Image: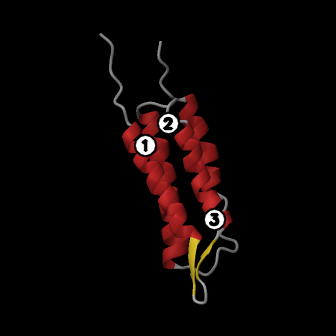
Amino acid sequence: MTEQTRDYRPIAYAIILLGLLSGAVAALVPQYAIGFKLEVGVLFALIIPFIVYGALSETLRGAALLLPGLVLLGVNGALVVKERLLAYDGYDGSPIYWLPLLTAAVVLPIAYVMRPRGD
């Protein structure tokens, strides 16, 4: 009898959508004269980890799929709340440009190496 691995892909897709939404929230900065300004660098820095995570969603299974997504979402969420919603004073010198990419560069390869392999 083989053990079934639970399919976490629907949850992973929800994590991806929330990550993309957090990128949009951080990248759309209100400007008094023009409405909103799109910070393209911030948008790319926050959504690229979720694009790569989405590309791995067919390869990873079980906890190896769910845990990296939750880590990425937690880092993005904490950065967006701190840098954009609580204390926004521009993104100059902010870790919002490099911390999500660094987190993805560390977490996603570990998840890929630790993924369950079918025999």
Q: Nearer the viewer, residue 98 or 17?
A: 17
> Along the polypeptide, which appears first: circle 2 or circle 3?
3
Q: Residues within 10 Å of mark 2 (few under 14, many from 20)?
A: many
Give the numbered dot on residue 32: none
- What quarter of the picture does the N terminus occupy? top left
Q: Residue 87: horizontal and vertical position, in percent?
A: 53, 79
CB contact under 8 Å: marks 2 and 1: yes
Q: Nearer the viewer, residue 78 or 61?
A: 61
Residue 79 at least partly seen: no
SS for callout 3: helix
**Is residue 109 toward the left or the right of residue 75 in the image?**
right
SS for callout 2: loop
Please, what is the three-letter code of the amino acid marked with disc 3?
Val
Q: Residues within 10 Å of mark 1 (few under 14, many from 20)?
A: many
Q: Residue at x 53, y 42 (%)?
A: 54
Q: Residue furthest left?
A: 1
> Along the polypeptide, which appears first: circle 2 or circle 1?
1
Give the numbered dot on residue 57: 2
Position above or below: 108 against 84:
above
Please, what is the three-letter code of the amino acid marked with disc 2?
Ser
Q: Residue 69: horizontal and vertical position, in percent?
A: 48, 46
- Residue at mark 2 to residue at mark 3: CA–CA distance: 24 Å
What residue is shown with label 1? 12
> Along the polypeptide, which appears first: circle 1 or circle 3?
1
Q: Nearer the viewer, residue 55 or 108?
A: 55
Give the numbered dot on residue 42: 3
**Is residue 24 toward the left or the right of residue 93 in the image?**
left
